[in-house]
Image (spheres, helix red, strand yellow):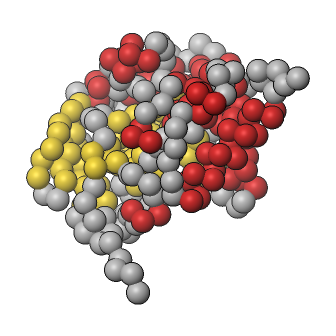
Amino acid sequence: MNTPTDSTVIDAVVTELLARENERRDGGKLTDQYPELDIPTAYEAQRELIARKVSAGERVVGVKLGLTSRAKQQRMGITSPLTAVITDAMLVEVGVPLVTGELIHPRVEPEIVFVMGERLAGPGVTAAGAMAAVRSVHAGLEVIDSRYTDFKFALPDVVADNASSSRFVVSSMGVDPTGLDLALEAAVLSVDGDVVDTATGAAVQGHPAEALALAANALAERGEAIEAGMVVLTGGLTDAVFVNPGGDVQVEFTTLGSVTLPIAPVEEPR
């Protein structure tokens, strides 16, 4: 008989999630099919999912934080952000259009992005200690793309699905973190030239460094750390927005500058 954390369940969950991603299709919650998929097991599934991507040639380049809004955490019954892994295959270079045909139902959200200068390992990491390990701060946009229908999932579902990771773009010019007040850093999100939302860095756990510290401490519980040189997506500042083929999404920050993600037109069938 399989135990709740048996590798059979992890293998089945990961195989299904990768199939959905590769075949560009969504599906129902896997916790309905595998009720033994709790959060620890889901993180093991996430680890296996990334291992398979690495075996296929991808390279881990950083960490993504999910559910960094305190309101969202309360709704989901957690007290710290989710962590996920980003790879080089998810990076969209500045100016390169996003090809939505490669994805299922993408949405875009603005992010404050850290590039780490030093290794950050818990436990006991504070916001001040986390910020001291940051080399540069950038404007960013993340494309999320859940493998679940209508983005409907339980917490273990989204953990196993690598927190809906899909694509991301980061401004090429970074800002020295010294003297920045990221809690007050304002962001304006525009779609096709129209402003659709605004926020400040306080939307991310009160301050992005707080989210970074919580993530480092959570990773330490699983024997992991945030390595020097890694990119860290600190969490969406606003709700994610849908994108229009042929249009673009832009975020403009007070201090960090701006970054624009063009959306490729839909190709006509040949």
Out of 133 and 16, give the one closest to the viewer: 16
Q: Residue at x 33, y 17 (%)?
A: 71
Residue lying furthest bottom: 270
Quadrant hosting residue 33: top right
Out of 202 and 41, give the one closest to the viewer: 41
Quarter holding the N terminus is top right
Quarter holding the C terminus is bottom left
Q: Residue at x 54, y 33 (%)?
A: 29
- Where in the figure is residue 174, as x and y percent of width and height? 38, 49
Residue lying furthest right: 1
Quadrant hosting residue 39: top right
Question: Is residue 5 something one can see in this rendering?
Answer: yes
- Where in the figure is residue 258, as x and y percent of width and height? 25, 52
Q: Residue at x 59, y 19 (%)?
A: 217
Left or right, residue 246 beside residue 16: left
Question: Is residue 167 something one can see in this rendering?
Answer: no
Left or right, residue 230 beside residue 108: right
